[in-house]
Image: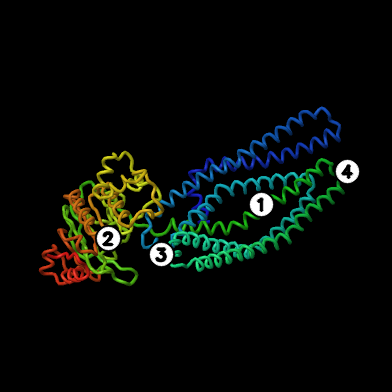
Amino acid sequence: MANVKWLWSHMRHAKVLLLAATLLMAMESLSNLASIALVQKMTDDVLLGGQSGRFWPLLLQISAAYFAYSLLFTFGPHAIHLTNAKVRTSMCGELMRHMHSIPIGILQKERTASYVYLFTNDLQTCAGLGANEIPRLMQQLAAAAAIVAVMGSASPIMLGVMSVFVLLYVVLGKTFAPARKRAAGEVNRRKSELLVHLEEGVSSTREVVAFHRQDWETNEYKSKFQSYFSSVMKEGKLINKQMLLSDPLKWGAVLFVLAYGGMLVLDGKLSIGMFVITYQLTNRMMESLNAIYDFAMGLSGKMASVERVRAVFEGDKTPDGTVDLREPIRSIRLEKLSFQYGEQPVLKRLDLTIEAGQKTAFVGSSGGGKSTVASLLVRFFEPSFGQILINDVALTDIRRSAWMERVTIVFQEPYLFPDTIRMNLLLGRENVPESTIVEACRAALIHDFIAGLPEGYDTVIGERGITLSGGQRQRLALARAVLRDTDVLILDEATSSLDLETERLVQENLDKLRSGRITIVIAHRLSTIRNADLIAVMDKGVVKEHGTHIQLLSNGSVYRSLVQKQNEESESPVAG
C-alpha cells in the first residue's frame, strides 16, 4: 500500500488526464457492449418479432453506438499516451533533480549503468503502471460488471455456473502466482545485468581493443545473454503450462453457454438474440478476466520497479541549509575538519583559514587528503567531524544552491558533453556575449585552437571530449570556469596534462583575472604553485606545515624534501 500511495503522490498532478483516460476507456467498452445489446434487440424484436417499425430507430442507435466506439477507440488510447507522457516526463525530471542531491559517496557505490537502467526501465514501468495499466484495468472491470448484469438477467443459473468457472480460473492463477512472480523477478534481474553490461561494454571499447580482449568481452556478453535467455525461457514455459490448464476452463465456459443456452432456446425460455449475445459476451468476459488476471500477475513485478525507484527517491540526500549568501566570500575557515571513508581516516582535525585575494595551494603525496578537502568544499561529502565556515557561517547552514553559485571546481579529468564546444563552455547559460566567450578561451590558451577548427566554437566534440587531447580538454574546462567567474575557484590537478610553459601562462592569466578572490589549487607538480600566498603541505590527512614557497623551503622539512625529490626527477627545478 505504501508503494501505491507513493506512486499516486507522483501522479496527482496528472489526475484530470488520468480520470479522463479512465472514463474514455470504460466508455469504449460500454459502447461496444451497447452495440451488441442493440443487435440483440434488432434480432429478437425486428427480425424475429416482426416489429418492423423499430428497424430504422434501432439501426440508427446501432450506428451511433459503433460511431461512439470508433471515436472512443481513438481518443481513449490517445488520452492514455498523453497521461503516460506527462507522468513519465515529470518523474524523470524529479528523479534527475533528486540524483543531483544524492551524496557522491552513495553514487560512487553504484554502477552508472544501474542508474541508467533505473531511468530507462524502472521509471518507465512506474509511469506505465499508473498512467496506462490502471485505466485499462478499469476498462476491463467496467466491461466485466456490465456483462455480469446482462448474463444475470438472461439466466441466473448460467451466471452461477459461469461464476464457478471464474472461481476455478482465479484459483489456478493464485496457484501459479508465486512461481510466476519469482520467474518475472529473475527475468528482470537478468535483463538488468545484461543492459548494464552492454552499457559498460560500449564505454570500455577503447580499453578492450587496446588490451586485445575482444574475445573475452564477447564471451562475457554471451554468458550474460544466455543467463537472460534461460530465465525468459523458464518464464515462458511456466506461462505456457498455465495456459495449457486455463484454456480448457475458458472453452469449457463457452461450451456450457452453447449447450445450456441452446437448451433454453429450444424450450422457449431464451430468445435467439439473447442466446447469441450471451455467447459473444461469454468470450468477452473471459477476455476481460484474462486481462484482469494478467494485470494481477504482473503487478508484483511492476511493484518491484516502483519499490526500486521509491528507494532512490527516499534515500539519503545531502542536507540543505536555509541561509542565503548576500555578500562576496571574504573567508573560508576549516575548523578541526575531519573525514573518513568507512573506518579509514582521510582528514584529521584540519585547521586552516583562507582569505579573499589569497591563492592557496594544497600539496603533498598521493592519498594525503588534498582532493578530499576540495570534495568537502563543494559538499560532495559531509565532514565526519568539525566544520567549514564561509564568512563565519557554517557551510551546512547555507543553501546548497546559493553556495554552488559562488564556487567552481575544475577536475583533473573534466566531463565534456558530445555537443558543440560552445555548449560545453556555456552549459545552458544564455545571452553570453561572444567577446566574453573568446576572452575566457584566450585566458585558457584554447581560443587559437578553436578558431582553427572548421566550425569554430560550433564544432561538435565526441563523447567525453574524446576528439580532444587531454590538455585541450583541461583548457576547455578552465575556460568554462573562467566564464562562471565565481568568488571561489578550486583547481583539482586541473593543469596536470599541460606542458610546463602552457601551464605557467595559464596560471598567470588566472591570477590576473582572479585578483581579490579566492583560488584554491590542488597540485602534485610543485612548479604550478610557487607564487601561492599560502601553501599547505598535507601528509596522511594532516597539515604538516604551511607558509609561502620561500618560507617552506627555509623552514619546512616535508615541503623541502618534496621539492628536492621533484628536482631529481625533472630537468626543470622549482627552487632557485
> Disc 2 to disc 1, how far (Cα)?
62 Å
Pair 1/4: label in front: 1
Judged by depth in the image, the label closer to the viewer, 2 or 1, is: 2
Tag 1 secondary structure = helix
| Amino acid marked by disc 4 | Gly
- Residue 516 in the image: x percent, y percent? 16, 50
Residue 157 versus residue 288: which sits nearer the camera?
A: 288
| Badge 1 amino acid | Ala
Residue tagged by mark 2?
496
Q: Which mark is residue 291?
A: 1
- Asked if the residue at tag 4 contacts the one at tag 1, i.e. Cβ–Cβ closer than 8 Å, the answer is no
Question: What amino acid is labelled 3 in the image?
Answer: Lys
Badge 2 local density, few (<14 within 10 Å), some, or many (20+)? some
The alpha-carbon separation of the residues under discs 2 and 3 comes to: 27 Å
Q: Do the residues under discs 2 and 1 have CB atoms within 8 angstroms?
A: no
**Observer able to see residue 402:** no
Residue 268 tag number: 4
Looking at the image, is mark 2 or mark 3 earlier in the sequence? 3
* Relative to 218, residue 270 above or below: above
Mark 4 / mark 3, whichever is N-terminal: 3
The reply to whether dot 1 and dot 3 touch (C-beta < 8 Å) is no
**Residue wearing tag 3:** 109
Percent across and percent down for residue 346 are 28, 69
Which secondary structure lies at badge 3?
helix
Which mark sits nearer the N-terminus, 2 or 1?
Answer: 1
Question: Label 2 sits on what residue type?
Answer: Ser
Disc number lying in front (4 or 2): 2
Q: Earlier in the sequence, mark 1 or mark 4?
A: 4
